């Protein structure tokens, strides 16, 4: 009886110290289980169909859309965005570039799409398209161009945006993502001031979030970051959000994209 | 009409592994919206699978199954080129069937 | 809606792009960025666009490099002067309430209904380990396990403990008083928590009876 009691005490004591390791292992196991059958595939299929479908006032498909590698070239485009586009004379990320194509090729109203809340109407189609386009670059390594002056400038702006402290809690992106080996609660935080590794950070979005059953592109990911930073609401596709994409994407040069990924 | 399912069926020897991703809200009927009103239950109740037209699996689901459910099962005796069909029916009477070829 | 800083920022931007022979100076990039930030965010719920107005500390700490020593000293001095000490000299509340506050990360976002501190949590476990029983803790800040015990606090009424009690209050009220670019929010100064709530968190850390000090 006494031996059983002592053994139980020992088990209880060691559980506390092993709690950290097994919690992290448990979470890793859970994530591996989730990865098989990523609902992002449903959005990929929808996005591929939307790319080819004739839609909008001009009743045209997006198959001539130039994502940076020439009209209609989708493979490899995702890992080179954001980049400068000569026709719009600005640096654009995937989502704002898609809005440009939906406007120019299909006749949609780009400003209306930008004003539409996430999860509604054309924003849903935009998310599906972004998910499919990301999937077409899965396994490729990030290689954002920095040859154009505008691209270089956006990197510098993005760096400043990243470190911009404001709001009632004095947070910047760097407050959470500025150092190695940190976490909030049990959520590991990638250091986005440098290359955080394959399939991490910038290389893991768009992603399907199991906790709320939603597909999130980078614009929504940044939007929710700003919400948690207690900032005011960032405009969809606004320059600071694109600049952050340039900063993170250039820092991640060489990292393998696993988008669209799955998250808790 | 609901969004299509994604079905993959891969044969390895005598066993064929079928993986299905279904697009469905799977609302439990327990949640309340921002105004405090209960969001009505809406979930898949019956799932069936057939191999070359012959039923090989049936399942009865409830509200505890997650949104956009992922289902995996194995069939014996299927070979490449065979047809696998999966169908579901929900509590509102909506249904969907999709087909895939075993690879 | 064009803000007053947008037009000058855009002029700088167009001048910068037009004169592309030389890259923009760091100062021009700073001005450009500030203009873009001010022009790109809008009010939503309780989160107003004026939250982007930076004070000296926020401005000086918006960099991967630390501010100049003199600037850091100024920030710290102003922060120290801003601390409001608790009424009645009462520093310690109820550690049970403190644990509840430490567990809650609620408040101040644009999806929160009210900016009243009563609606806010203290956010502590997001960044700190506190009670060892809680395994879901962050590592952005140092562990606070045994906080009072390690600092020899056996009786909070003992005058010998006054310095540490006051430091702890001051750190929570305005963390920048002790480190100009501290990552920690200024819970009192920014009206994130009220006096009563701060007393409860103080108790969690300093009360010898708190589980944190066992």
Image: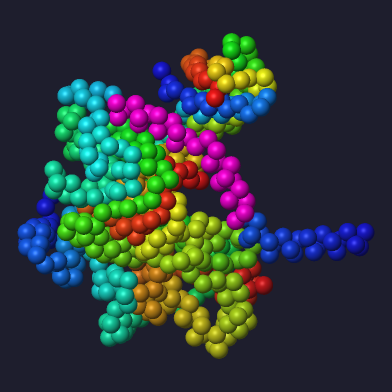
Query: Looking at this view, is B72 or A87 the one in front?
Result: A87
The residue located at (42%, 51%) in the rendering is A256
Rendered position, A72 above or below A141: above
The residue located at (21%, 60%) in the rendering is A152
Rendered position, C33 above or below C85: above
Query: Looking at this view, is B101 or A18 the one in front?
Result: B101
Q: Residue furthest bottom?
A: C160
Residue A109 in the image, given as x and y percentages of width and height: 17, 33
Residue A42 forms part of the magenta stretch: yes
Residue B103 in the image, given as x and y percentages of width and height: 54, 25
Tally of numbered discs: 0
Quarter where residue A167 is shown: bottom left
Q: Quadrant of the N terminus of chain B?
A: top left
Q: Is residue A86 left or right of residue A39?
A: left
Q: Is residue C15 left or right of residue B37?
A: left
Q: Residue furthest right?
A: A1
Q: Report whether residue A160 is seen.
A: yes
Q: Report whether residue A108 is seen.
A: no
Residue C123 in the image, given as x and y percentages of width and height: 47, 61
- Examine the residues drawn in magenta and state their main secondary structure: helix
Rendered position, C5 above or below B53: below
Q: Which residues are magenta?
A: A24-52
The residue located at (58%, 51%) in the rendering is A28
Residue C148 in the image, given as x and y percentages of width and height: 58, 77
Q: Residue furthest top?
A: B53
Judging from the image, the colouring scheme is rainbow
Residue C122 forms part of the magenta stretch: no
Query: Looking at this view, is A133 or C66 the one in front?
Result: A133
The residue located at (55%, 72%) in the rendering is C144
């Amino acid at each position: 009886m006494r031996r059983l009691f002592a053994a139980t005490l020992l088990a209880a004591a060691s559980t506390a110290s092993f709690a950290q390791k097994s919690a992290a292992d448990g979470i890793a196991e859970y994530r591996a289980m989730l990865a098989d059958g990523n609902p992002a595939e449903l959005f990929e299929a929808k996005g591929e169909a939307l790319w080819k479908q004739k839609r909008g006032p001009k009743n045209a498909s997006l198959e001539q859309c130039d994502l940076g590698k020439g009209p209609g070239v989708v493979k490899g485009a995702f890992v080179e965005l954001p980049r400068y586009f000569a026709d719009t004379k600005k640096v654009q990320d995937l989502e704002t570039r898609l809005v440009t194509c939906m406007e120019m090729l299909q006749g949609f109203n780009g400003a209306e799409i930008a004003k539409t809340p996430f999860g509604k109407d054309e924003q849903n189609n935009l998310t599906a398209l972004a998910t499919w386009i990301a999937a077409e670059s899965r396994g490729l390594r990030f290689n954002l161009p920095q040859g154009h002056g505008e691209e270089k400038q956006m990197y510098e702006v993005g760096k400043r945006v990243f470190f911009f402290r404001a709001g009632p809690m004095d947070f910047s992106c760097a407050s959470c993502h500025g150092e190695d080996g940190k976490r909030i609660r049990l959520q590991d935080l990638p250091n986005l001031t440098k290359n955080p590794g394959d399939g991490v950070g910038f290389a893991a979005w768009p992603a399907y979030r199991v906790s709320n059953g939603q597909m999130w592109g980078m614009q929504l990911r940044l939007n929710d970051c700003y919400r948690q930073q207690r900032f005011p609401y960032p405009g969809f596709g606004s320059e600071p959000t694109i600049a952050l994409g340039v900063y993170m994407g250039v820092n991640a040069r060489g990292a393998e994209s696993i988008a669209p990924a799955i998250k808790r | 009409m609901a969004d299509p399912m994604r079905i993959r069926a891969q044969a390895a020897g005598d066993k064929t592994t079928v993986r299905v991703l279904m697009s469905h809200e799977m609302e439990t009927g327990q949640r309340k919206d921002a105004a405090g009103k209960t969001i009505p239950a809406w979930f898949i109740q019956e799932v069936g699978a057939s191999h070359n037209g012959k039923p090989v699996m049936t399942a009865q689901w409830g509200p505890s199954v997650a949104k956009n459910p992922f289902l995996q099962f194995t069939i014996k005796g299927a070979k490449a080129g065979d047809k696998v069909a999966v169908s579901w029916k929900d509590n509102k009477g909506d249904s969907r069937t999709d087909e895939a070829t075993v690879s | 809606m064009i803000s007053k800083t947008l037009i000058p920022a855009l002029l700088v931007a167009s001048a910068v792009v037009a004169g592309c022979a030389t890259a923009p100076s760091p100062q021009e990039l700073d001005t450009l960025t500030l203009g873009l930030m001010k022009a790109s965010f809008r009010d939503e719920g309780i989160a107003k666009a004026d939250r982007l107005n930076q004070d000296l500390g926020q401005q000086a700490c918006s960099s991967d490099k630390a501010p100049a020593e003199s600037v850091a000293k100024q920030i710290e001095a102003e922060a120290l002067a801003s601390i409001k000490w608790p009424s009645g000299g009462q520093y310690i509340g109820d550690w049970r309430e403190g644990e509840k506050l430490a567990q809650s990360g609620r408040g101040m976002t644009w999806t929160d209904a009210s900016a009243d501190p009563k609606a806010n949590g203290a956010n502590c476990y997001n960044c700190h380990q506190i009670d060892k029983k809680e395994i879901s803790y962050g590592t952005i800040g140092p562990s606070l396990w045994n906080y009072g015990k390690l600092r020899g606090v056996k009786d909070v009424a003992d005058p010998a403990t006054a310095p540490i009690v006051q430091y702890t209050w001051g750190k929570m009220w305005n963390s920048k008083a002790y480190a100009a670019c501290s990552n920690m929010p200024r819970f009192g100064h920014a009206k994130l928590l009220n006096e009563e709530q701060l007393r409860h968190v103080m108790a969690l850390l300093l009360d010898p009876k708190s589980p944190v000090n066992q």
